[in-house]
Image (cartoon, coloured by chain):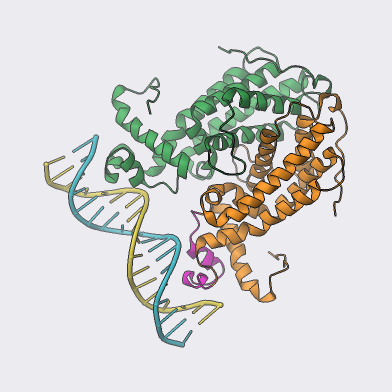
Chain colours: A orange, B green, C cyan, D yellow
Amino acid sequence: MAERQTGTRRKNGDRRQVILDAAARRFAEFGFEATTVRQIADDVNILSGSLYHHFATKEEMLAEVVRDAVLDQRERALRIAGSAHDAETKFVTLIREELTALAERIEAYAIIFNERKFFRRSPDFLDLMKARKESFEAWRNVLEQGVREGLFHAGIDSYLTISTIMRMLNSGADWYRHEDGSPLDAMADYSLEALTEFYAGFVLRSVRSAERAAEPIPSSVVVA
Amino acid sequence: MAERQTGTRRKNGDRRQVILDAAARRFAEFGFEATTVRQIADDVNILSGSLYHHFATKEEMLAEVVRDAVLDQRERALRIAGSAHDAETKFVTLIREELTALAERIEAYAIIFNERKFFRRSPDFLDLMKARKESFEAWRNVLEQGVREGLFHAGIDSYLTISTIMRMLNSGADWYRHEDGSPLDAMADYSLEALTEFYAGFVLRSVRSAERAAEPIPSSVVVA
DNA sequence: GTCTATATCCAGATAGAC
DNA sequence: GTCTATCTGGATATAGAC
């Protein structure tokens, strides 16, 4: 409930932030379309019309809710990819930091994934889509560096591989959120650490060159 | 446009089937909620009210659209898992047949994945969810058989592994459908065969025991 | 089996008083 | 910044004639 206070946001933006938090909860739980502005308003004890003093449209709320998460995602990817470590260390660090961010902002990530068709279609989200593409390219560069270094196996398709991995991690966000009885959703038992080790292992075994299959998974590094 | 004529469907069900095909196209392209019954009606040159002669509700259309795909999915999984081959051969066959089905009924699969929250929430879909769970368990059994046989590596978490793989393949259905300019969606160039080999390799390298990392990917088998 | 016509409801959004 | 009040449109679904 207590939310971060990022740079540009003044103390007085709190009201706005409370609304956004309610919106995020609704969007993540029931979806963007299924959520009505009245529900959001009720959650913060306000009337629906009053929301329009803070936001021009419901879509603007959607953009605000996911904005920081997407921009931070790009910043992380570029920072790690641009560091001076070997490709495997960077790759593992990308996965670990991504999963940590995903756990911290699980609602935003679930929304990004589940409502991706809105981001694809509306020009309002072009900058966010651009940030996503830059994250993608950063990951891809790390993978290709690893192939050049001989750490990863030679025949790998970097485009398919990275898009598969990113979809895997992102769909995990929604899945991680659901404690209901769905057949594929009994994961409340897994800690973030356990999930991180699982994904790091799963992915690394896939991309490594065969002769390195038994090597231990390297630790994450802290990248300034 | 010309659709398959499955067993139980009489020639006279054609009208109904034409409506379902239109609904499937809309649901896959724009989502279930964003699709109106009027749009479906327009697509088949009928008035919206007339649809209710064929279906009681819009949700019933949704159920009908995905029903066969889900039931066939279970049938495939049980058939392959119950066959007498080694686990790796069965596992590869599961992946290959799943991707073939996915390509043939790409709309149904995309809908199943994108609208999964409806299936989770409504009791009308309990039987479909049950079928999904049975598919899941069949895959899981094959994986665990492989661990016992020493083909797959010992420490593997069968629950996490199968749920990850199934989400990977299923999210691929939606992705495979999008030819638009999304950063992660430039795949129209990939043939089904290329994608199948990619996924089979990606998954198999992840689950195999380290000493078998360099073995070739086995062929699919035909399972009666 | 489709049409005409419409009931019923609720969505997103707005205007202006306080 | 929130409220009162309401517009406007479009949604699912129904009833009964043809």
Which quadrant, please, contains the N terminus of chain A?
Answer: bottom right
Whether B89 is drawn above or below A15: the answer is above
Residue A142 on image: x %, y %: 78, 40
**Magenta run includes residue A35:** yes
Which quadrant, please, contains the C terminus of chain A?
Answer: bottom right
Classify residue A220 as left or right of residue C12.
right
Residue B2 appears anywhere in the view: yes
Name the residue nearer the viewer: B131 or B211: B211
Classify residue B60 as left or right of residue A54.
left
Q: How many marks?
A: 0
Name the residue nearer the viewer: B119 or C17: C17
**Magenta run includes residue A37:** yes
Asked which quadrant contains residue A153, the reply is top right
Classify residue B87 as left or right of residue A35.
right
Whether B18 is drawn above or below B75: the answer is below
Residue at 75% over, 40% down: A141
Whether A53 is drawn above or below A129: the answer is below
Asked which quadrant contains residue A193, the reply is top right
Residue A204 on image: x %, y %: 79, 34
Q: Which residues are magenta?
A: A33-53
Residue A198 appears anywhere in the view: no
Residue B44 on image: x %, y %: 31, 37
Residue D6 on image: x %, y %: 34, 73
Residue sticking out furthest to the front: A148
Residue at 69% over, 74% down: A10
